[in-house]
Image (cartoon, helix red, strand yellow):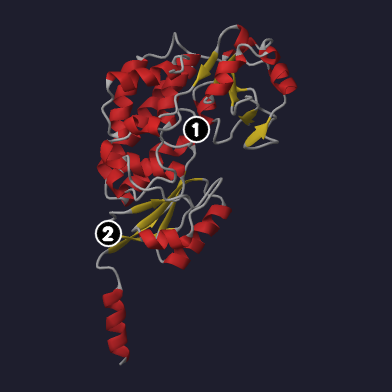
């Protein structure tokens, strides 16, 4: 009887399985072939879509009408699944079990809080759960790690090399620019522009990686997103402001509170495109690589080589699996050049 039970237990195991060590050092057993992936949050959904779109079981939030043209047609109508992590998490384990994916992926922080969540969900559902480090400088490694796990190692490697080449180009440019001569940048979030990210936050990594000096810097005492006062912005007096909020962008030039800010006076307030994902963050994922090229051109127009129109077409083809039509490209560039579409 004992031998029979052992045989039955062995038969119940997946025919093929392997282990993957994720960014948190967790050794996770995954199926040899992964065909379905549940994204724990928006950053993970972008990463999975970029690497292996046919495996994505759904978007944490359904695509909005203005985003649809920037996603390959077969994946525009996959269902909304909610999210397991981050702000407004509304997916529950019943929903995950209903979908029953081969794998759950989270892309972002690998702090203990997220390790505990991953372990708990994996134990309760029996579904393997990978944590991938979402720091901007870890982008190439994230692509290689998940590309290998999903069975698309060749694509993961190609994208990782593209990321490394972009970083290397930027590093070469910045070697010639002393820290004190780099643009002083403020990220204005929300309709009033007074939510921002402190230096080192995942929301402002792109500013710092592009060679901007984030004026929201208290020496590391405060982390993450914060609400700034108008007085603090006035004292910081950035020479460049970037935002993804069209309401703030539309109103800042006429708002007397902002008139004394150097960036407003010189017309250096820029509106980030947000389709299908934000170029600054929203979410902080692979989409930031497009934003990095855009921001390098904004901050160093005489040093950064590359045409935004050509670069945007190439990026959306390589990363988002979509050939942009002229109308779709023009809508993006209207945002990127500070002319929000009507």
Q: Quadrant of the C terminus?
A: top left
Q: Which mark is residue 32?
A: 2
Locate residue 253 relative to residue 93 in the image: left or right: right
Whether residue 164 is visible: yes
Whether residue 176 is visible: no
**Regarding mark 1 in the picture, which secondary structure is present there?**
loop
Please determine whether, in this image, residue 147 is positioned above or below residue 285. below
Q: Nearer the viewer, residue 234 or 2?
A: 234
Please determine whether, in this image, residue 322 is positioned above or below residue 302. below
Q: Which mark is residue 232?
A: none
**Regarding mark 2 in the picture, which secondary structure is present there?**
loop
Determine the image quadrant of residue 171. top left
- Which residue is the extreme one toward the right? 231
Please determine whether, in this image, residue 87 is positioned above or below residue 281. below
Q: Which mark is residue 281?
A: 1
| Residue density around tag 2, few if under 14, some if 14–19, many if 20 or more, within 10 Å | some
Q: Give the foreground label among 2 and 1.
A: 1
Q: Horizontal and vertical percent for residue 314?
A: 29, 24
| Residue density around tag 1, few if under 14, some if 14–19, many if 20 or more, within 10 Å | many
Marks 2,1: beta carbons within 8 A: no
Q: Earlier in the sequence, mark 2 or mark 1?
A: 2
Determine the image quadrant of residue 9. bottom left
Q: Horizontal and vertical percent for residue 8?
A: 28, 81
Q: Horizontal and vertical percent for residue 28?
A: 40, 60
């Amino acid at each position: 009887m004992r031998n029979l039970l052992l045989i039955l237990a062995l038969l119940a195991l997946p025919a093929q399985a392997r282990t993957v060590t994720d960014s948190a050092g967790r050794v996770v057993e995954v199926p040899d072939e992964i065909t379905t992936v549940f994204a724990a949050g928006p950053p993970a959904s972008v990463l999975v879509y970029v690497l292996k779109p046919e495996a994505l079981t759904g978007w944490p939030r359904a695509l909005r009408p203005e985003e649809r043209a920037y996603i390959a047609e077969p994946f525009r109508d996959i269902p909304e699944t909610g999210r397991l992590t981050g702000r407004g998490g509304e997916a529950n384990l019943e929903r995950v079990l209903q979908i029953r994916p081969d794998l759950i992926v989270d892309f972002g922080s690998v702090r203990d809080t997220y390790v505990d969540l991953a372990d708990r969900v994996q134990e309760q559902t029996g579904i393997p759960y990978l944590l991938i480090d979402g720091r901007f400088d870890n982008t190439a490694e994230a692509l290689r790690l998940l590309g290998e796990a999903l069975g698309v190692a060749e694509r993961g490697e190609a994208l990782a090399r593209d990321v490394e080449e972009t970083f290397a180009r930027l590093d070469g440019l910045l070697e010639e620019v002393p820290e004190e001569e780099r643009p002083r940048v403020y990220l204005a979030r929300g309709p009033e522009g007074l939510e921002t990210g402190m230096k080192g936050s995942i929301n402002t990594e792109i500013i710092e990686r592009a060679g901007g000096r984030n004026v929201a810097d208290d020496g590391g005492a405060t982390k993450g997103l914060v609400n700034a006062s108008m007085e603090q912005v006035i004292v910081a007096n950035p020479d460049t402001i970037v935002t993804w909020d069209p309401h703030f962008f539309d109103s800042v030039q006429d708002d007397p509170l902002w008139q004394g800010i150097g960036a407003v006076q010189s017309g250096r307030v820029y509106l980030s495109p947000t389709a299908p994902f934000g170029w600054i963050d929203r979410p902080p994922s692979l989409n930031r690589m497009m934003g990095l090229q855009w921001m390098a051109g904004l901050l160093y127009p005489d040093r950064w080589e590359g045409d935004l129109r050509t670069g945007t077409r190439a990026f959306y083809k390589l990363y988002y699996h979509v050939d942009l039509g002229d109308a779709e490209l023009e809508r993006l560039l209207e945002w990127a050049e500070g002319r929000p579409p009507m």
